[in-house]
Amino acid sequence: MEVGQRNGSSRSTLSQINVTPLVDVMLVLLIIFMVTAPMLEQGVEVNLPEVADAPGLAAGKEPLVVTVEKNGAISIGKTRIPEASKLMPVLRQVMETRKEKEVFLQADRDVPYGRVVEVMAAIKGAGIEKLGMVSQPPEPPKHR
């Protein structure tokens, strides 16, 4: 007896699933995600200083990054801090849920030294045990 036939019935039904529309939809979704994924990355544009021989720090799962922009604005991750005086309480609150007390400080090379030291003092005042400074390696010289 064939699939879909009943006793004495001459009519047969096809009980197979057509997956072609499903494959088409999945390919369209894949293309959409591939195009939009790079656009989802957001961050703060900072011109980092270049350091030739600085050893790298081993980062945990998700490092907490404090950024000082060229105009002096401070942010923790992607969250802007309105005033420097609010940095210490916000850091204390964020660090309550973290096991490792580690922060990376990334400051634009044009930020005044005093502003960077002020942010470092607030980070240490919040009870942070490890403070890493973010820099980038210098570009190799271009040969003609």
Image: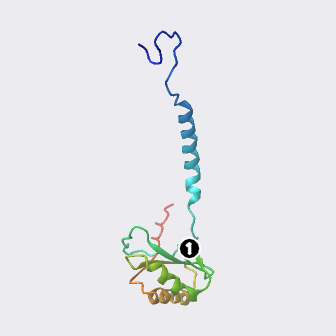
Depth check, front residue: 103 or 70: 103
Residue 61 occupies quadrant: bottom left
Which scheme is used to colour this image of the protein? rainbow
Q: Residue at x 54, y 35 (%)?
A: 22
- Can the viewer see residue 49? no
Q: Residue at x 53, y 12 (%)?
A: 11
Q: Residue at x 54, y 40 (%)?
A: 26
Give the SS element for disc 1.
Answer: loop
Depth check, front residue: 114 or 92: 92
Q: Residue at x 62, y 82 (%)?
A: 82
Horizontal and vertical percent position of residue 41: 56, 61
Q: How many marks?
A: 1
Horizontal and vertical percent position of residue 54: 39, 76
* Residue type highlighted by circle 1: Asn
Horizontal and vertical percent position of residue 59: 39, 70
Q: Which residue is mark 1?
A: 47
In the rendered image, the vertical position of residue 21 relative to residue 65, given as above or below: above
Depth check, front residue: 16 or 26: 16
